[in-house]
């Protein structure tokens, strides 16, 4: 019998990343060192807002082991942090300087940098730098009228708007208009590895190297090249192991520019490793928004329009992301429902807090909370069932692809495919919704505070426009995929290996995956916004198919066989039309394509090919969250008894890894729903600067999670049908927990603010009394 | 600050004689002095547990101990738990159950679990969950970590019976 191929996509395969990671052989940022390196410690502002009057460097400079000390005056050539997309006129003046110039705007803002031979010495000396700051009153509430960022410049650099339909008419025609005031707390990704950056300048080749890169090494290479006026080819970024990304790691921060500038100036490697205290007051925060949202409905629950004005608390500077989270919120808020009219204004406001940017499911965790609270309120106000109102307004499968006249980060808000009703039915059936409701009702009647909530969402993924990959096979048959993707712990290598292996016809363990190395490939999109598996995955698929084609062409000649009778099985080209009849290994084919091989003929040398995937469309996965919670009326503590996530990922390359993404995302969402919050006091002092204050869930808080992973609607926008998986678990956790708590305590609409801390819940009880 | 103390650590069976400042943490010493970077530093105040190592068999936060306090001790780090060629059942189970994503917290969880299971091989689920709650992970949501440690405990118990 002819040999058959083993499918490599769709299996719950063990990850190729794991062996070094479970044996302590990983290479995280802090693990990277170079001979003669300097360590840098940052002197940070102790005040939320103020004018720098004087900086006394003498004592620190005199400290043994100190090599240099920089303030803003020492680096006039280093410009403020650039936007990822390049110049944005109206935000230009608001960019963060690498070291504070004249004024400080948040606690933790870098003011000076101390370079020393030893990290302990640098930290000692940093404490000797005396900074005299004249305190100014801080602006801490983004909902207050805008203040002065600096003389003549408002703390509101812009208001973004989108909309369609006739909102005024919708409001006039409505049987009910319901208005809610909703707040999402300030929280963030908080990866277990703090940030780190190690720069080295190689004078021999005039190359600047930056290690500790993540997320978007190629874009950051280009940005660094722009910043320092260098050719991109003379700046190389290297991604090692990355201890969690979640959107916040891998952006260019002041420290990345500082070590780069110092490495070039001193011609010595410069290493910076953040400590946790620094991380919690300087790494990008996210989420904080307050929405004043109206929904216009008919008496039967049909949505006529959503009218929303919100205030986005950006913190002190726009950093690399500028207004992206506001933009995202505008574009995605109506979600999976038919909303005939929509009007939204997002106020982008600067405050004296740590700057903000993206965190896993940016703009969606927030807008799902707003949208789902509105829908719950519609049902509650009209005396309808919350589920029935959702069902009535859900976009149907027949309406796909569904184009909504909105823009999501430069792309049309078009939902490519989906069967929202079908997934909803499946989720309800799985959890036994009716019986569950009856049981919860009985328990409530017996005095328990228990309830269930449901939330529905559409995610976005796979934004283009293009990504490429190069697949090659060497003479031993080993396969290499070179990508410009990034691995932030999500299993990128395994996913790419499986995709490549499946197209090529080898075992995925034979595939080595390169990512995050700017000197290996010219372009790359990195890993962000659930793009990597969709974009780089499809590029890899296309490249691997091209390699396969080339291998078959050569084999057909060598084996004297018709090409249609050949297949690649386990790394060998074999005949499929008869049990025997010769075979040839991919490695041997690669050898026959060596530039010096006589068999090469007129062909391009090497068994290798490039592949590109281009798209102008999003791939939009969708999901359902159902939560069952219990509330302790004495303490205000919330316990999640059960949580179900139903999700259509289009095609799961590795279901085990997709489920891992979902469960992990869920837990971060739970943190934001119940525990995590960056709190500031009235002087702008951050109160959540240790893990004892910023409370992330532990195993004790982890409920049982059930997952229904579906491949009902593969994306028609890419050859493999893939939709992103990274943000499914987190998207609606805040929304659904709020919904379930309402029901549990018998106070519909009571939860208007995340996280629902015990204190906030106690306050709700007290108000209800 | 520059007074150095000569100490001896036996790390994964190998003796290291080191001159350290009194204030240098055990975690930094293992990493910089012994060159074993598998022990990770996640918070430096004893909450996250990424730096957990076994000191004379006990799981300890290496960030909360000074190296001088460990003078003369036998220390096991993740590098000494098993090798790529002969993985420890816990390492095997973490891979099989997808109990790691970024892998940064993994050495701490492995060493914590190794210490717990050595002392209480037939630990029940509640006690195990309680013990593993002392470390933080930000990627996995914990379910897979619990499953992996449970599976490893069962595998180790079975081996002993035989």
Image (tube, helix red, strand yellow):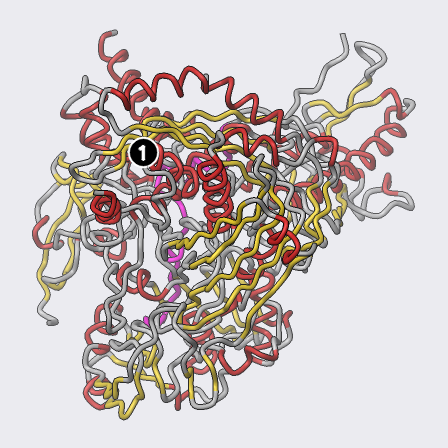
Residue at (22% x, 8% y) in the render: B161
A68 up-or-down from B61: above or below: below
* Residue toward you, A72 or A40: A72
Q: Residue A546 vs residue A100: left or right? A: right
Q: Residue A402 vs residue A752: left or right? A: right
Residue A95 placed where, x, y %?
Answer: 49, 78
Q: Quadrant of residue A699?
A: top left
Q: Residue A690 vs residue A18: left or right? A: left
Q: Residues within 10 Å of mark 1 (few under 14, many from 20)?
A: some
Residue A266 placed where, x, y %?
Answer: 42, 81
Q: Is residue A522 magenta?
A: no
Q: Chain of mark 1?
A: A
Residue A367 placed where, x, y %?
Answer: 50, 50
Residue A614 placed where, x, y %?
Answer: 75, 50
B40 up-or-down from A388: above or below: below
Per the image, label 1 sits on a secondary structure element best described as loop
Residue at (47% x, 81% y) in the render: A154
Query: Magenta residues?
Result: A14-40
Q: Is residue A16 magenta?
A: yes
Q: Which residue is mark 1?
A: A746
Residue at (58% x, 51% y) in the render: A306
């Amino acid at each position: 019998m002819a040999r058959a191929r083993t499918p490599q996509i769709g299996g719950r395969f063990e990850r190729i990343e794991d062996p070094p990671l479970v044996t302590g052989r990983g290479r995280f940022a802090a693990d990277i060192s170079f001979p003669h390196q300097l360590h840098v410690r940052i002197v940070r502002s102790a005040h939320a807002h103020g004018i720098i009057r004087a900086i006394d460097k003498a004592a620190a400079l005199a400290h043994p082991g100190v090599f240099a000390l920089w303030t803003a005056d020492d680096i006039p050539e280093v410009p403020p942090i650039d936007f990822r997309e390049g110049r944005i006129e109206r935000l230009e003046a608001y960019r963060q300087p690498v070291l504070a110039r004249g004024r400080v705007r948040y606690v933790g803002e870098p003011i000076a940098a101390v370079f020393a031979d030893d990290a302990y010495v640098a930290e000692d000396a940093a404490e000797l730098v005396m900074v005299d700051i004249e305190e100014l009153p801080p602006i801490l509430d983004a909902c207050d009228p805008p203040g002065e960022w600096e003389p003549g410049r408002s703390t509101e650099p812009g208001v973004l708007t989108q909309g369609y339909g006739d909102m005024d008419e919708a409001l006039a025609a409505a049987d009910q208009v319901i208005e809610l005031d909703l707040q999402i707390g300030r929280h963030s990704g908080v990866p277990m590895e703090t940030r780190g950056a190690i720069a080295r300048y190689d004078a021999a080749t005039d190359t600047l190297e930056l290690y500790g890169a993540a997320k978007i090494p190629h874009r950051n290479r280009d940005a660094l090249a722009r910043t320092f006026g260098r050719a991109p080819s003379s700046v190389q970024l290297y991604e090692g192991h990355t201890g969690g990304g979640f959107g916040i790691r891998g952006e260019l921060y002041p420290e990345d520019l500082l070590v780069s500038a110092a490495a070039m100036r001193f011609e010595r490697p410069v290493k910076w490793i953040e400590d946790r205290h620094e991380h919690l007051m300087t790494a990008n925060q996210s989420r904080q928004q307050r929405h004043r949202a109206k929904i216009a409905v008919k008496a039967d629950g049909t949505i006529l329009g959503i009218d929303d004005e919100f205030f986005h608390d950006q913190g002190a500077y726009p950093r690399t992301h500028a207004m992206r989270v506001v933009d995202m919120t505008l574009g995605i808020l109506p979600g999976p429902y038919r909303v005939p009219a929509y009007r939204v204004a997002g106020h982008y406001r600067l405050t004296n807090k740590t700057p903000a940017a993206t965190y896993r499911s940016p703009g969606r965790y927030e807008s799902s909370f707003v949208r789902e609270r509105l829908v719950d309120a519609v049902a509650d106000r009209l005396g309808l069932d919350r589920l029935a109102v959702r069902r009535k307004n859900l976009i149907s499968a027949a309406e796909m692809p569904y184009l909504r006249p909105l823009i999501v980060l430069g792309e049309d808000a078009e939902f490519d495919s989906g069967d929202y009703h079908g997934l909803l039915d499946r989720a309800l059936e799985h959890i036994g919704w009716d019986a569950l409701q009856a049981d919860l009702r009985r328990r409530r009647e017996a005095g328990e505070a228990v309830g269930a909530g449901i939330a529905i969402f559409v995610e976005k993924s796979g934004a283009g426009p293009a990504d490429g990959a190069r697949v090659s096979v060497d003479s031993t048959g080993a396969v290499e995929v070179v990508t410009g993707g990034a691995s932030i712990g999500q299993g990128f290598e395994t996913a790419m290996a499986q995709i490549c292996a499946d197209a090529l016809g080898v075992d995925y363990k034979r595939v080595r995956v390169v990512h995050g190395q700017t000197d290996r490939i010219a372009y790359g999109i990195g890993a962000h916004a659930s793009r990597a598996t969709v974009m780089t995955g499809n590029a890899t698929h296309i490249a691997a198919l091209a390699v396969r084609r080339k291998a078959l062409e050569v084999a057909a000649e060598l084996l004297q066989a018709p090409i249609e009778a050949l297949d690649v099985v386990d790394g060998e080209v074999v005949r499929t039309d008869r049990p025997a009849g010769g075979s040839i290994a991919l490695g041997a084919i690669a050898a026959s394509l060596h530039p010096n091989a006589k068999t090469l003929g007129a062909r391009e040398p090497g068994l290798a090919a490039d592949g590109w995937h281009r798209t102008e469309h999003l791939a939009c996965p969708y999901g359902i969250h159902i939560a069952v919670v219990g509330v302790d009326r004495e303490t205000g503590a919330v316990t999640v008894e059960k949580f179900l996530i139903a999700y259509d990922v289009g095609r799961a390359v590795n279901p085990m890894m997709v489920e891992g993404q979902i469960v992990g995302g869920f837990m971060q969402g739970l943190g934001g729903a119940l525990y995590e919050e960056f709190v500031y006091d009235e002087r702008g002092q951050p109160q959540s600067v240790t893990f004892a204050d910023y409370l992330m869930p532990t195993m004790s808080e982890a409920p049982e999670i059930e997952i229904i992973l579906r491949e009902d609607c593969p994306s028609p926008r890419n050859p493999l049908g893939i939709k992103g998986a990274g943000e499914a678990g987190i998207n609606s956790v805040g929304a659904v927990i709020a919904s379930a708590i309402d029901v549990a305590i018998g106070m519909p609409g009571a939860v208007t603010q995340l996280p629902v801390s015990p204190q906030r819940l106690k306050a709700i009880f007290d108000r209800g009394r | 600050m520059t007074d150095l103390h000569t100490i001896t650590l036996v790390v994964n069976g190998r003796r290291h004689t080191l001159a350290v400042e009194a204030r240098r943490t055990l975690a930094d010493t293992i990493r910089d002095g012994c060159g074993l970077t598998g022990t990770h530093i996640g918070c430096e105040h004893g909450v996250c547990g990424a730096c957990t190592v076994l000191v004379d068999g006990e799981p300890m936060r290496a960030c909360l101990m000074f190296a001088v306090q460990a003078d003369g001790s036998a220390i096991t780090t993740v590098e000494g738990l098993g090798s790529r060629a002969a993985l420890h059942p816990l390492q095997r189970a973490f891979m099989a159950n997808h109990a790691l994503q970024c892998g940064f917290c993994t050495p701490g969880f492995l060493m914590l679990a190794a210490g717990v299971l050595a002392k209480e091989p037939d630990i029940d689920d509640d006690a195990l969950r309680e013990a593993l709650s002392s470390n933080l992970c930000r990627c996995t949501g914990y379910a897979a970590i619990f499953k992996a440690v449970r599976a490893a405990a069962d595998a180790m118990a079975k081996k002993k019976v035989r």
